Amino acid sequence: MVKVGGFFRSKECYKIPVLALHNWLGNHEHTANSDLERINESYWVNEREVDQKVKIQPSVSVQSYSFEYREPYFPDNSDANYRKRNKTNLLETDWGIWGHNLEKIVPLDQETGARFSNEVVKSQFCFSSEVLFNKLDIYIGKLSSESFRSLRFMIAANDNRIVCHCNSCKAKGNTTKNASPAVFHLINKLAKKHPQHQFFGLGYLTTESPPPFKMEANAGVMLSTMPFPKGVVISKTSSAPRLDDLLKSWKRVTKKIYIWDYAVNFDNYMEPYPCLFIIQENLRHFQSMGVTGVFVQGSGENYSAFQDIKCFIISRLLVDVDIDISKEISLFLGQKYPKEIADEIYRYYSLIEGKSFVSTKTMDIYGGIEQAREKYLNDDDFREFYRGIREKVYSGVCENELKRLRLSTAFMCLELSRTGKRYLDRKKMNVSVNSEPYETSNSLLTHLQDLSAETSMDVISEGGRSIHGYIKEWKSDGILNQSGKISWPVKLTSTSKLDPDYARVSDLQDGRVGFSDYFNNWLINSSEQLIVSSSVTTEMIAKDVSIGFLQDPAHRIHFPTRVEMRFPEQNLTLHPKDIKFSSTGTKRYYIFQIAKTVKTGSPILFCFWNDHSKEGRTIAADEILISL
């Protein structure tokens, strides 16, 4: 067994099943010998298992690549054999320092900290510090003596907007907002001292602009696509001139320009996030503008939907940006699975890749399922795909890979149910939860739990959300625990200012319950006070009303400081009779009881207070439910 990322995979998974290969060849008679050569080169065919009538020639080494640095950051690429076959790099082995990690090597203290207004700021470095240079020099020298090979080093400021303003940094050209002069002066100094290595800065925040001097031949910059729209061909957007100007400005000072791009939804690894045709067009443009290396961030060591396809195709694109992606996907799946399974996966993945490519909608790398629906995701098509791969019988060498794909589709089917058509009826007070979604969700949860156990998969997001936690939320907060409750049945309106991306107060009564993820089913508001109004019907009198709120400090979402129900005609204010927490502790339910003295037809105000004394704080409100 070889360890790939966070799970173990049999080496046998990389051999072509003989039956699958024969099935595939029977339906692809037009395939040229060069394609079969590449199967041997890239997919690790075990030639002894291949029928002698299939002549596989030794592969020919590619002498010219589209980019000098090529990394798809997915689980498959962590395997050394995979990298050798697909000509890719790996940050864990090719970089001596990566990202914002200087502090792991050099402590931030009086001698290395940035200076501003004659005070040391211990959250940022002074890049003119001789102590910083000396300690980095020693560290690099030590790695050189241990590895005896060329490495790359990223010398990056900490992830904030602080700029050192000491006399030495100012003399080099630092301003209050631009740290590039001092940072890249240090990079040049290290590059001269260690010519066998390569040194890079990050074109980001205070170092987005190039320095006012040429960089050493072994020094360059890595630019992130984070400031630019995601899920679209950037050259076709209004951001194209800004990107081109940025690349041109760096090209004037260095010949080594790397790009940091992205290929998954980091809030939901199980979402397909089809982006390969888009990446191809962006890579073509990057190459034409002088970009020499690309790091495509995927799900790292964790599984993400269709990660095997993405990892392989991106590997191929970084070698040859003009490959036929559809053909490559067909080849890849044809060697991995029997024909009917390969065809099922190819059909659906090609469908969503095509939809994603032609759509001009953006597709953020952090976000909920609605952006996917607007871009490429059709609920019925996806459920059909889930049923298609669930029903196929397969026990070959890549069975576990197929199980992981089934797991991701089961999870997404649950998300479609949770965020789609309401499953809590709000039309009549005497209608309980619909039984059909209850039964469907229960079956999906069982399937998800079984597959999680079989594959040892649990992580579903960059933030560490887990499958076992998700299942727990379904059972405690979702439809499986909402029997006897309905959504608020009378129209809600708001007299407060609603945030542009969360302008539907109807989200509080749409029957879709929010979990611990802030990006689905929540009404997020940044006002000091959110007031929602409605009216009371006869059936509500003496009934319990619950309102859910989310706590997610990482995204500046906090519980409200106060929650009240007001009946202005009667000069009556109700406070919660009880407060309950969800199973995860991230949700708080405020329980009220509508007083018997409240008159039918009376207006009602739901009032929520946000702590506006702390900048950027928001509240996230969820379904207003009535107990029957």
Image (cartoon, rainbow, N blue to C red):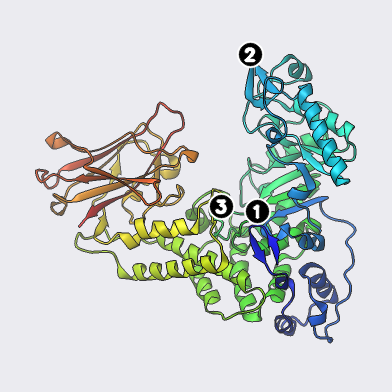
For this rendering, which residue is in front, 5 or 569? Answer: 5
The residue furthest top is 118
Q: Residue at x 70, y 72 (%)?
A: 13
**Amino acid residing under circle 3:** Lys
Decide: is 560 above or below 123: below
Circle 1 SS class: loop
Under circle 2, the secondary element is loop
Q: CA distance from mark 3 to mark 2?
A: 46 Å
Say few, some or many: other residues with alpha carbon within 10 Å of mark 2 (under 14 / 14 to 19 / 20 or more).
few
Quick one: label 1 or label 3, which is nearer the N terminus?
A: 1
The numbered disc on residue 419 is none
Disc number for residue 117? 2
Please provide percent x and percent y for residue 120.
Answer: 64, 18
Closer to the chain start, of discs 3 and 2, is: 2
Give the residue pinned by disc 1: 300
Q: Nearer the viewer, residue 186 or 286?
A: 186
**Residue at the disc numbered 3:** 361
- Binning the other alpha carbons within 10 Å of mark 3 as few (below 14), some (14 to 19) or many (20 upward) gives some
Q: Residues within 10 Å of mark 1 (few under 14, many from 20)?
A: some
Quadrant for the C terminus in the image: bottom left
Looking at marks 1 and 2 on the same chain, the residue that comes earlier in the sequence is marked by: 2
Which corner quadrant of the image does residue 602 belong to?
top left
Q: Secondary structure at mark 3?
A: loop
Amino acid carrying mark 2 in the image: Ser
**Above/below status of 599 relative to 121:** below
Residues marked 1 and 3 touching at CB (< 8 Å): no
Answer yes or no: is residue 489 visible: no
**Nearest the camera: 286 or 368?**
368
